[in-house]
Image (cartoon, rainbow, N blue to C red):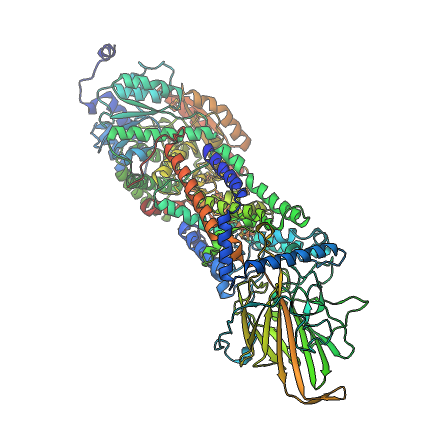
Amino acid sequence: MTAAKPAMQRLRDAVNEVDFNRFRFWFQITAFILFVYGGYLAIDLGSKLPFFSCGYNREGRAGVCYLLPLQHQLGRNWAVLFSMASLTILTGFLTFAAWFIVLNKGWCGFVCPLGTLQDWISALRRRLGIRYANYTQGQFAQLTKIKFVLLALLILIPLGIGGGLFSHDMSPPFCLICPARMVLPLFTGDLSQFTIDFSSKTAVVMTALGISVTALFFVGSFVKKRFFCFFCPMSALHYLISKPALLKLKKDGSKCTRCGDCYAVCDMEIKEIADDVKTTNIMTDDCTMCLKCVASCPETGALKATFVGIPIFVSTETGFIKRMNKGCQHGK
Amino acid sequence: MENEIHQVIPINPVPYSRSRQAGEAQTVLDHIVDDFQENPVAMQYFYDLFRQVYCHGDEIPHSGKLVGTTCIQAPEELIYAFGATPVRLCNGSYHYDQRGADFMPAKSCSLVKATLGMLSSENVIPKIGKPDLVVNPSTCDQKKKSSVMIEGMGYSVYDLEFPNVKESEASRVYWRRSVREFANQLRKLTGKRLTRANLKAAMAMTGRAQAAFRTLHNFRRQTPSLILGKDAFLVTNAYFFDDIERWTTAVEKLNAELAERQAAGFRAVQSKAPRVVFTGSPPIFPNLKLPLLIEEAGGVVVADETCSANRMLYDMTAVDEWLLSDMVDSLADKYLKPCTCPIFTRNDDRKRRLLDLVAQFKADGVIYQAFSGCQVYEMEYRSVAEEFNKAGIPMLYIETDYSPDDQGQLSTRIEAFLESLKNRKKRHA
Amino acid sequence: MTSLNRLFALLFLLMLSGSLFAEPSEAQKAEWRARREAAGGEAPSEAQRAEWRARREAREASAKADESKPTVVANEERIHPTSGKSAPVPELSHDHGAMGSRPAADKGAVKPEEAARPSGRPAGMGMRGGGGAIWLSDSPPSRGDGAGRGGMGGMMGMGGMAMGGERSGPPSKRLWMRAGSDPQKSGFAREDADAQNETLIVRPQGPLDGEALAPPADGKKNLAFEMPVQGYYRVYASSRKLQGETLNISVAKAEIANFSHGGDEEERAQALTAPRVLDSAPIEIVREKAADEKMFFQLKSGDEQAFVVLQKGLPLQGARVRFVSHEGWSKEAVSDEQGRVSFQVIRDYFPAWDDFKKRFKASYLIIAEANAAEKGVFKDQPYSNVRYQATLAGNYYPSPDDYRSYAWGLGIGLLIVLFSGTAVYLYRRRRVKPFQEVRFDDGR
Ligand code: SF4
Ligand code: SF4
Ligand code: SF4
Ligand code: SF4
Ligand code: SF4
């Protein structure tokens, strides 16, 4: 037992002192390849994935984003919707929740192909030496609500379609304006989403809207880190069910100096991560659980990621110094 | 007007090393070195440094423009990045304190008076040369008010605007702007351009220094202590004027020695020596009065929360994108956000930091120094005392200044306090 | 940054309103029409189109008058990409050798069937009466025009989805026996007492040689069955009748794909590899699945589609195979040594712009015939010839190329990227944001 402890400790230290950004970069690439091209290897992880592994990427996807079946299920004819057949909505949701619970919002920070893509666009901007944009606090407070509005619409519009209030050309409403629908299929050479559908007025509006959002996605994520995630209804849905999640972002306020280092690196501009010293479960609705804050906190034990209560990545002074030295030397 | 003043004060024609001022430094240094046993060998560098600078009046060479700072809030990374050298002007000499009394009301902060006294004298010790720019962050009232006086002494002064409230977003934005503006000012001063490479190099330099400091800081967690507080204060005091690379190397050597001491099971103090966290107005050489009194009386200062040591070197900067805009903003944040300076409206962070230090360093009590005339520390006493009361941590509040006159009375109080800490410890054990 | 946001909001609004008014111009419409025609083989003449239009309008009028008839319940779960993916579909004819070596199908010109052709099939073709070939349709006569809501009923080019309109319980399906060789005009097939009829259904997990399917009951005209499991349901309505020396054997077949999104994966996988041929069928047409065909397949006009004619499970060479489009166009080809023929699905849906429905369901009909000098006895009567006839119907839809425009899509996208990009750039350059007026030049 005494022999095992140093080994365990050594492993812990190695993890805590890892070159985090590089680790995350490779992890994200791997996940991106898996979910955007995994389909070619006949990988199919179902259609209840808690991140944007877009179903419209027909060839390459290794599984489908839950929002797609959710909207379809809710868009059923009301007679069907309010019958036992809708048990599948419940089971579908439970499957989704089961996936989600494992990584919590970590799906966003590490796996979601659309999130990764935004990070790449940011990296491009960084390489070009162009500064990123920030919201002011006031803007932040306003904009952060949008994702909940989108989530509400994503549920209500399909219900309206099922009830015959809206045209079927609006289905599935969020997918039609989701940038992932257009962007991810591009990676498998499928450009077919980049069309305007002239078959009806609604279709014209929806497809034009979709194209526009995608265009704004490119421009937005070029100047703003994780531009889209800020508005992502998946993120809102995550937050609503994040209580029982296994992966948690924890903060020990007594160790925090409120230095703001974590805030400085946070792509989502989350102030609470630095300023809140009372909350222990510090994940907020905007958080993507990228854990960059943990990697850049100089106070040992102030921030940590835990899995089922076991700390798996803890902020340490040594880790911080190592990473910052690296930054000073080759940081981009 | 000024000339008149100078005429009234008799100027000592004897060489500096035999002046009363040098004598003051000599006495304290001898006390630090000789009255304690088993000083770390690596401390010799610092003893020698202070002897040369304060006792012999040796010159300190520097490169580029010299930028004097009166507070830790002036971002030194920026100064280094522009190829200039920062020097901290805060002074601890009683001699200058008396001299500065001409500028300030009698009952004002010794530190400010001493700084003014130093700047107003021809023979500035430490002999750093005349700063090309004095950066005076607008912190406490006394500092704010000294701006004009320093200008009157013929220095060019830059008031670095510093907010009074640190929690609000407005002040963050305001401060970031101040820092950007400061960079502008430095560009004008040096005629150089701020570049990514320069700033990164500067940050690497200060980062290394901070890392060395943190290592030293961490060695002080050890019980019984490996090193005394008076030495630690001397080390951080040297950072005020020493060449940063040389300083870092010396600290790294000291750290290596402490590591050996740790491995050898060395104890710098008795195991039952009460461990004390020092907070409040900053001890600056030669005014190491309180730390020395504490350690003479058998206590040991294991950590501090002062702007001449911990607060100056502890907090480190994280940068997400190594672009100038991000680096400068992150620097600004690191200077403002974690700062526990008493000039802010609220002091929650200071209280939390103190509690954490007591816990982390297994301290038995806290000694709170307030320079008489330092309103902000005096006024914060109440809330800090309440916090410690709640936590059941004994605290001794001492109001004092640079004069050596109260030494006897203080040592009685300190001994009594340490005694009570010892008794408490026994009872708890 | 407030203004940046405002900018974005404005842009959104602009686009929204822009796209609302983005009615395609006349020129644009003309262009699409031209493209449509170019892709759809030879263009029907204006006169022809006018005629079709008139016919459809007449039909729609009569359909309206006929509201009381049971409607095809459309399934709301349509073809969309959630479909779990199908494993590559094994080619139907894996046992028939290489498909690649087939001779190119006869690409003879598609010619409109003479409009007024009397049910002019060779005498004796209609054994159940009604004239013309007997075939199984997923809609009753006069409602053949598939523009129903969602247009999602059943056969969907044989690979579509079943109707799941029932409130609960498994989805069910109804098929109508129709006679005629024009998908829209064919009426109900009449009973023929002389004929010997048999209706079989092959269920996905049932016996491979099928089970008997009860004939329509209670005076209803449709064959109804439930589809509790996922997979392909095949119905074979065969009929034998002696006419002089000739025995007429006809097999009308329907293949219905029943898949659902939430369904059991194993069931699906099984269904996708199960055989689609009835070995006992005297003659049968099988729609060939393309190698990359998905579970929720939709045939689009303009697509090339191959069929295989089989006799007792073996390829039948030399059968005359006719493809009849929704509007009655037809084309004939002869099956090759692998029993294979292929047709390009003609484009024959040309509504006025406002009436265009992208989910317009059109039906096609395949009729295969072959004669054989086989001797035998039927109902105690000898015969010396056998005339085989097989039919298969399916659906097809307008090609997306008809209504989707890349030019517009990419154009709008590019425009917005340029516009918002420039706006952001200018904003960031010109703005003197309070407290941010000090800029750093980040060049090294
Ligand atoms: S379009 Fe967006 S919401 Fe829809 S399936 Fe794709 S990723 Fe999910
Ligand atoms: S918040 Fe971002 S990372 Fe998370 S699902 Fe949405 S797009 Fe993906
Ligand atoms: S980086 Fe760590 S110490 Fe600094 S504010 Fe964040 S949590 Fe607190
Ligand atoms: S709070 Fe931390 S984990 Fe969450 S988005 Fe910000 S940096 Fe990432
Ligand atoms: S000790 Fe007090 S009065 Fe003196 S400089 Fe510091 S804050 Fe100001």
Measuring from the top left, give residue B191's x and y in whole percent: 24, 31
Q: Is residue C82 visible?
A: no
Q: Taking C384 as reference, is C17 left or right?
A: left
**A243 vs C33, nearest the viewer:** C33
A327 over B306 or under it: above or below: below
Measuring from the top left, give residue C290's x and y in whole percent: 53, 69
Q: Which residue is most to the right? A: C218
**Residue at the location (66% across, 86% down)?**
C385
Measuring from the top left, give residue A37's x and y in whole percent: 47, 60
Dividing the picture into quadrants, the one containing residue B331 is: top left
**B192 vs C319, nearest the viewer:** C319
B167 over C206 or under it: above or below: above
Q: Taking B327 as reference, is C114 left or right?
A: right
Q: Is residue B138 visible?
A: yes
B358 over C144 or under it: above or below: above
Total numbered labels placed on residues in the image:
0
Measuring from the top left, give residue B166's x and y in whole percent: 45, 29
Dividing the picture into quadrants, the one containing residue B104 is: top left
**A190 vs B335, nearest the viewer:** A190
